[in-house]
Amino acid sequence: MNSYLEANARERLAAVLDAGSFYEFLPPALKIVSPHLAQLDSPVSFDDGAAIGQGRLFGESVYVAAQEGGFMGGAVGEVHGAKLTGLLLRAVRERPFAVVLLLESGGVRLHEANAGLIAVSEVMRALLEVRAAGIPVIVLIGGSNGCFGGMGIVARCANAIVMSEEGRLAMSGPEVIETANGVEEFDSRDRALVWRTTGGKHRYLLGDCQMLVADDSAAFRQAAFDLAQECHANAGGIGLTLAVLEAEQQLLQDRIDSFGQAADPLDIWTRLGVADGARLPMLEAEAFVAATAALRRGA
Amino acid sequence: MSKSVDWKTLAATLFPDGHTVVEQDDFLTGTAQVGGDTVTVIGTAGHAAIGVEIALLQAQAILATVRDHPQRSIVILIDTQGQRLRHRDEMLGINSYMAQLAKCIDLARRRQHKIVGLVYDQALSGGFITSGLMADGCYALPEATIRVMGLAAMARITKVSEARLTELAKSNPVFAPGAVNYLQMGGVEAIWHADLAQQLVQALNQANPQDLRSAAGLQRGGRGQAWTVTQAVIDHAGPP
């Protein structure tokens, strides 16, 4: 197995795409860096933490972006965000088979906060343009920084999400919540609680991600292709429709009605009918999916 | 801090021809008469923390408008302290609820509803990207506070002194809070100083479904790279 978690952004792209097929737009050699970080004596990166380009996935043409968690946690600044937006708008013009986003981000880069915030909203709108053009957008989440803040919202604007159990998807980080409302509210050092609340397995059970895979780049690769094919098989559902959003509205309302009183994700798993919820964290991805696929929401 | 207006005073000023907007648990909903047409009004009040419920209520109101009132314009009134910082919201997947609100606004736009946002008090991070920043055009009152975080918090995170950040903020709008900074960067289309009702009519008439904010940021000198880099990606040579 080739760990997705331990790979960096370009290694992930190389492993997810057909061998040798990645072609980068605005590569690091062009040294397009953040115009704001130097003023803060903060180091820059020649790709501003995002690798974007095109490649092939099982022979199909795809557009891809990968956020580099090793640079400022994959946070979105002005240039980083513009690279993502540019890739998405180019996809609208070039019409690849799919767009695959390898997200790993703490959200808006606080060093250039205002520009990062606007940039995330531009990414959201550009992503929805891609969907409106009939091109599916698939998100992969399995990096150590998770997918948080504005990028957690971006992820849920896509057609489908693939996660590993090590992947995390949420809005505010546990540390932020603990700082705001105390350790009783969310103990950020309780790793098991953090995992249960934001990890891939919980998201899969709630219906926020469509596939749960092992921490293996080949598994992410296969899942991305399978989901893109599924989207094309139901092409009318690639863009937003009233019916799709009404169904989503119902799913989200049901979630509050069913689980709004739960104190811990374990309570939710039990209410879903999982026989031995406490055992779930121990299961390998394949065994976990086998045990829960019929019980999860949004299936 | 700011001499902000409450939503009732705002609604009376903004909709002199009448409105039915009501508030319940910080959620604003109703209709108003603007320029001879009925518009849907949604929004938040009381510096609302956006939790799963209030995000979903706003999404519901937009879906109902799309379903029952084709092409009716939508006005979003914004006063939020950002997303609610609770374990329960994260457990329930609050990012999905906020994304749902954003997607509903986007669907409305694609079905020819004009959408205008107005920050009348506070707008922060997650509460803003899924409301005002998803509108065709977002506007602000002069007293509005728009930010991700204040300079003191930014100083702690970046380890750059607050005094230095304050100095930098004078020439670079990315650092400091404020409606004017967002105007320069293209995130806010204009700041309304007077004649709010007339400004709203005009904003709805001018509403443009195209996202032109990075070009505006470049033109206004507040965001030099966003448009340039976006275009460079689009124009980058393909593989040989």
Image (cartoon, coloured by chain):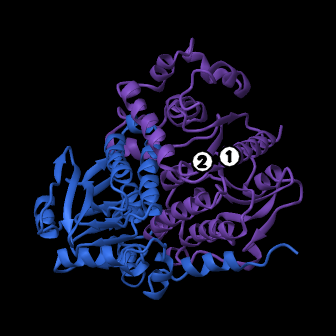
Q: Position of residue A196 (x, y in %)?
A: 53, 30
Image location (x, y in percent) of residue A56: 83, 57
Q: Which residue is mark 2?
A: A237
Residue topped by disc 1: A231
Badge 1 marks a residue whose secondary structure is helix
Asked if labels 2 and 1 touch by Cβ distance under 8 angstroms, the answer is: yes
Q: Position of residue B232 (x, y in %)?
A: 67, 79
Residues indicated by labels 1 and 2 sit on the same polypeptide chain: yes
Disc 1 from disc 2: Cα separation: 7 Å
Nearest the eye: A281 or A175: A281
Mark 2 chain: A
Q: Residue at x 71, y 44 (%)?
A: A233
Chain A shade: purple
- Ranked by sequence position, the earlier of labels 1 and 2 is 1
Quarter of the picture containing the N terminus of chain A is: top right
Judge by depth and name the residue closer to the eye, B172 or A156.
Answer: A156
Type of amino acid under label 2: Gly
**Drawn side of residue A131 relative to residue A170, left or right:** right
At which x and y percent is residue A153?
50, 51
Q: Looking at the rendering, which quadrant does residue B131 occupy?
A: bottom left
Q: Nearer the viewer, residue B197 or B89?
A: B197
The structure residue drawn at horizontal position 40% and vertical position 26%, both measured from the top left corner, is: A259
Answer yes or no: is residue A194 visible. yes
Label 2's element? helix
Looking at the colours in the rendered structure, which chain would you say is drawn in blue? B
Q: Few, some or many C-alpha atoms within 10 Å of disc 2 (few <14, some 14-19, many ≥20)? A: some
Q: Residue at x 36, y 39 (%)?
A: B86
Seen in the picture, residue A221 relative to B41 is either above or below; the reply is above
